Image (spheres, helix red, strand yellow):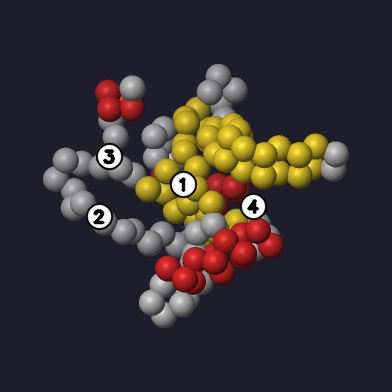
């Protein structure tokens, strides 16, 4: 973000796929938010209604950090998550490829928060 850019600015982006959006805006040190359709996503959003004066459900059910591209060319995220794949259960902090969030049917809402961190500030 340029030094003279307004702070606390919200930009709504439409017309991009999840992969196009994330490839364009994800950078190391930025925070990602997602909302989805799974039972866990819906339960979290429903629970957030107690935080709203009008008791509207929340939009975001998950947060993660963008780590950056690795030697494999893939963008990676750091997140605390619960994943169940057949006989394997992963619970807690883990690294996953950003491509996990490319599925528009599963992740219906995405955001990228840019706190203006420079490489010097990330260390």
**Residue beneath label 3, please?**
116
> Cα distance, mark 1 to mark 2?
16 Å
Q: Residues within 10 Å of mark 3 (few under 14, many from 20)?
A: few
> Cα distance, mark 4 to mark 1?
15 Å
N-terminal label among 3 and 4? 4
Of 3 and 14, the residue lying toward us: 3
Residue 2: image location, x then y, percent: 20, 41
N-terminal label among 4 and 1? 1
Say if mark 1 contacts mark 2, CB within 8 Å.
Answer: no
Report the residue at 39% width, 40% height from top: 30
As drawn, the residue found furthest toward the right would be 87
Q: Secondary structure at mark 1?
A: strand
**Residue beneath label 2, please?**
8
Report the residue at 29% width, 35% height from top: 117
**Residue beneath label 4, please?**
103
Residue 26 left/right relative to 70: left
N-terminal label among 1 and 2? 2
Residue 93 left/right relative to 11: right
Say if mark 1 contacts mark 3, CB within 8 Å.
Answer: no
Report the residue at 33% width, 27% height from top: 122
N-terminal label among 1 and 3? 1
> Cα distance, mark 1 to mark 3?
14 Å
Circle 3 or circle 4, nearest the eye: 3
Q: Secondary structure at mark 4?
A: loop
């Amino acid at each position: 973000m340029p030094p003279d850019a307004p702070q606390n600015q919200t930009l709504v982006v439409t017309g991009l796929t999840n992969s196009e959006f994330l490839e364009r805006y994800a950078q190391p040190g930025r925070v990602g938010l997602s909302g989805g359709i799974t039972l866990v996503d819906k339960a979290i959003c429903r629970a957030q209604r107690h935080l709203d004066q009008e008791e509207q459900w929340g939009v975001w059910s998950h947060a993660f950090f963008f780590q950056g591209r690795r030697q494999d060319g893939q963008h990676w995220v750091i997140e605390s998550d619960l994943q169940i794949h057949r006989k394997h259960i992963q619970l807690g902090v883990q690294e996953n490829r950003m491509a996990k969030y490319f599925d528009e049917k599963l992740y219906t809402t995405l955001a990228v928060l840019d706190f203006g961190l420079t490489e010097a500030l990330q260390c």
